[in-house]
Image (cartoon, helix red, strand yellow):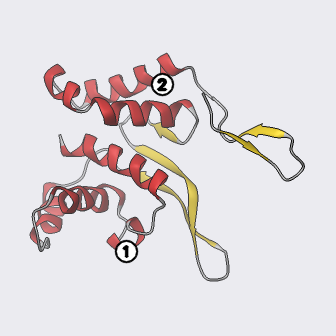
Amino acid sequence: MPVRYRSFNEKPFYMFEQVIDPELALKEVEAFLDRKKIYPKRRATLQGAVDTIAEAIQYGQVTIAEDGAITQELLDPIVDDKGNAVLSKISYSARIAPSIMASKIAALKSQTMEDKLLCHTMAYSGQAAGIINKLESTDRNTCDAISLFFMV
């Protein structure tokens, strides 16, 4: 059920409009995991991320291309001091060269799960850590769920 808000004139409206059936959204995520050859047991450990991505697809925030590339439209775009949008979507490559990931991991100061997740996000999206860390929590949750798929 979408989140319900009220406008200043008290007319109700819905923040999210479903653009794809929930079952079809889930099938898109499963097809992505099939292309990545993720075993069923590993998928079970990723169920929270699967649900997050499927819901984001359902409401049109995330799209998965045939080649496995993922695009995330930000619910809260990052803006500069003047209110101009600096970043309104993040595109994640389907694959990256192992050397790119190795260089990101080598630059880690710590080996926490959060740092590793950030490294994967940076490597697959091409975005800097400073930009990723500016994401609002709803966008960051989706971003992290997407990055978990690339960690498996």
Q: Quadrant of residue 88?
A: bottom right
Question: Residue 27's spot in the image, x, y percent?
Answer: 41, 19
Residue farthest to the top, as pictured: 23
2 or 27, which lies in front? 2
Q: Is residue 113 visible?
A: yes
Q: Secondary structure at mark 2?
A: helix
Question: Residue 6's spot in the image, x, y percent?
Answer: 78, 45
- 81 horizontally vs 35: left or right: right
For label 2, the crowd category at 10 Å Cα-Cα, with few meaning under 14, some 14 to 19 and many 20 or more, is: many
- 55 horizontally vs 2: left or right: left
- Quarter of the rendering occupied by the C terminus: top left
- 48 horizontally vs 114: left or right: right
Residue at mark 1: 130
Q: Is residue 94 above or below residue 135?
A: above
Q: Earlier in the sequence, mark 2 or mark 1?
A: 2
Q: Quadrant of residue 5?
A: top right
Q: Is residue 125 above or below residue 34?
A: below
